[in-house]
Amino acid sequence: MAGGRKLSLPYVSGFALWATIAGLLALGLTTTLVDFMGLSEQESIRANEARQRFVINAVTGEVMLGSAPTAADESKFDVGEPEAPKPAAAAADPMVAPTPETPAVTDGATASPTTGPTTPTASEASAEPPATDAAPTPAEPTAEHAETTAPAAEAAAPATPPAAPEPELAGAPALRTNPITAPITTPAHSKESLVPAPAREVTETVHGLTLPKRGENNIIPSKLYARPFARKEDQAELTFVIMDAGLDAQSIGLVMALPPEITVAYSPYSRKTSNYSEHLRAAGHEVWTMLPAMNDRYPADDPGPMGIISKMPPEEALRRTHEILAAIDGSVGLVTAPNEAIGTSADSIAPVLGEISKRGLLLLSSHPTHTLSQMTTNQGILELMRRADLVLDPAPNEAQIRSKLAGVIASAKEKGSYVVVLSARPQSLQLLAEWLKANPMSEDLVLAPLSAAFVAKEAPAPKAEEAAADGGHGAPPKKEKKKEKPPEKKQKPLPQDKYLKPASGEKSSDGH
């Protein structure tokens, strides 16, 4: 108070007060949302600059280091032998313009004619972030180029030595970023090729979709599209099924390099590469279709617009089943994923199984614990179903895959028919190819397509001794007839018999 006057503040009430409060709240909320949305990007940039971020996809095996991979820098997960640390090379002067053969040095990274750009230090990374797109690896220069550029590099070396590279752990495996690929060639039709699809005898159009059907004279797709196979009576069958093929184009060439007895389960979502399924069938590979369905991570992992989900209306499940069957031509049947969660819901999968039976197809369940009786109790449908015996690579672990492959032959000979499923990861396909090359099939074991596992095995023929005992040709044994005693012959009367007195009630031989 000064001079007897009171200091008074303006009094705000009513609409002006609440409008001011609402404006401040809206401003604070907007600022918070903007900061929150940019937080993940800022953290990613900071981790990329420090080269501290590794992202490994357990399904595809892809490795991302520092920045997102591009089409030119696409990589696959693979564990190789430890590499010896390379000696540090003299850094080139950043003021000297690079020659056409020498790649340009950017972002403070040093380079040498043989090793290319090296990783920047933490201080350099914090001062200037690297480019978001990974630079292509430069080609190694020739000996002549190395001789001409080495003196210039030595003369242009800076006064301060470059930072020494971080020491590598002894015995630690190195991550190789070279993708595992194989060329894709269009095979010519031969005696190994299967029937071209779709075959008119077992095809119909429903609502614009080309679907398989049962044909006349008991012609069904599961027999017409199957790979012809015959085995000896004393041979055991070993079947390999590659799941989710077609999603990665790199796996197509690796699959086509495998023996034609290997079965391929194609993904219905691979429409862009669906023509490769006919390439595989032309090479002799039997083709099936993967059944998209909810898994144990649903709803975080959605099966897609064709996925079968529990408590789905039967009409919608039937519509999606038609889209799945129309996606791949020449399919013998459907294959469920090892982590599916629909197999225990009989009501949800009933429309799918009913359509499979109606159209003459088969179904393979690859879940390690779900039984076929959990899906249905219909004996007619159960005859069209089969369970896989082994999931080879639930995780991309090379040691586990090799360990499981080591026991496959003994298990197949013990059971007589053994079905192994594996993913289409390039690493798994390469390990399978190496194993098949190192373990050729013996006389009592044969590689078989998946359709052979659904054929009822005939009882072995009886041995020679058993065939002789039962009359041959597998007929039931003959019943032994009881030998009847021959009638007793009456002895001729002797001359002295007429003097014998006959017993009472009998007449003598002379009639008295």
Image (tube, rainbow, N blue to C red):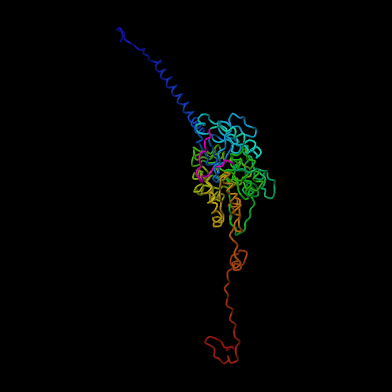
Q: Is residue 170 magenta?
A: yes
The quadrant where residue 474 appears: bottom right
Q: Picture coordinates of residue 5 (x, y %)?
A: 31, 8
Could you tell whether 341 is left or right of 21 in the image? Answer: right
Q: Nearer the viewer, residue 404 or 386?
A: 404
- Which quarter of the image is occupied by the N terminus? top left
Which residue extends farthest top?
3
Q: Residue at x 49, y 28 (%)?
A: 38
Q: Picture coordinates of residue 178 (x, y %)?
A: 59, 41
- Which quarter of the image is occupied by the C terminus? bottom right
The rendered magenta stretch, by its main secondary structure, is classed as loop
Q: Is residue 349 magenta?
A: no
Q: Nearer the viewer, residue 462 or 267?
A: 267
Q: Picture coordinates of residue 124 (x, y %)?
A: 52, 31
Start and end of the magenta stretch?
A: 160-178
Q: Is residue 471 above or below residue 24?
A: below
Tag count: 0
Could you tell whether 399 is left or right of 102 in the image? Answer: left
Q: Nearer the viewer, residue 94 or 224?
A: 94
Could you tell whether 380 is left or right of 11 in the image? Answer: right
Which residue extends farthest left?
4
Q: Nearer the viewer, residue 97 or 340?
A: 97
Q: Is residue 117 above or below residue 334?
A: above
Q: Picture coordinates of residue 98 (x, y %)?
A: 62, 31
